[in-house]
Image (cartoon, rainbow, N blue to C red):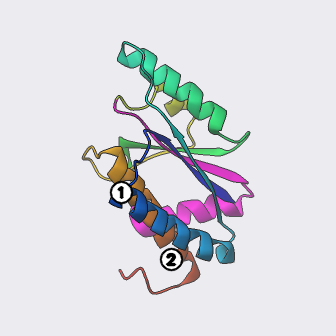
Amino acid sequence: MRIGLFAVGRLKSGPEKDLAARYLDRFSKTAPAVGLEFSRVAEVAESRAGNSETRKRDEAAMLRKAQAENGVLVLLDERGKALDSEAFANLLATYRDQGKRDLMIAIGGADGHDPSLYQEADQTICLGKMTWPHQLVRILVCEQLYRAVTILSGHPYHRA
C-alpha cells in the first residue's frame, strides 16, 4: 500500500525539513518488507481567500486533486481519535490487508479542514488534544510512519 502525505503549507529548508526527510527515508527503506511504501508529499500553499470557510473549501479541493481514486483518507485533527503507536500501526496494516492501494494522511491549514472532508474521510485521528504547527506535525507523522513499520516488522525501535 502506498502512503502519501498532504500538507497545507510548505516546509522551508532547515532542521524541520531535514528531520522529516530522515524519517521518510527510514520509512522508505524499511516499509516494503511489510507491504508498505512511501508515495509522495503533496505540499500546497495556504489559500489566500479572504475568509476561513473559503480557504478551507479551496484547500479541500486541492486535497481531492492530490488524492488517489478510491484511496483511503486519514485526516489529522485535534478532535480526532487518539491512537497510540501500536494502534496506528495496526490501522495501516488493516487497510493494507484489505487490499487498499493508496492511503493519504492530510495535514490541514491554519483554519483546519473543510467540514465536507470529515464526511469523506475514512478516519480522523489526532496527535494529541493540543494544536501543533504544521512543521512539527509533519515531523511527528513521519516518525510515526517509521515507528509503525518497526512495530509491524518486530524491530526493537519501538519499546513499550
**Rendered view: 112 above or below 37:** above
Magenta-colored stretch includes residue 94: yes
Toward the bottom, the furthest residue is 156
Say the numbered circle drawn on residue 14: 1
Residue closer to the observer: 25 or 144: 25
Residue 140: x and y, percent?
A: 38, 59
* CA gap, disc 2 and disc 1: 29 Å
Say the numbered circle drawn on residue 121: none
Residue 87: in sight, yes or no? no
- The residue type indicated by label 2 comes to Ile
- Badge 1 element: loop
- The residue type indicated by label 1 comes to Gly
Reading the chain from its start, which is encountered first: label 2 or label 1?
Answer: 1
> What residue lies at 47% left-to-right and 68% top-to-bottom?
23
Residue 113: x and y, percent?
A: 44, 31
Mark 2: few/some/many CA within 10 Å (<14, 14-19, 20+) = some
Magenta-colored stretch includes residue 125: no
* Tally of numbered tags: 2
> What residue lies at 36% left-to-right and 19% top-to-bottom?
52
Residue 96: x and y, percent?
A: 67, 61
Residue closer to the observer: 76 or 26: 26
- Badge 2 element: helix
Disc 2: which residue: 151
Q: Which residues are magenta?
A: 83-110
Image quadrant where residue 108 sits:
top left
**Circles 2 and 1: CB atoms closer than 8 Å:** no
Toward the left, the furthest residue is 130
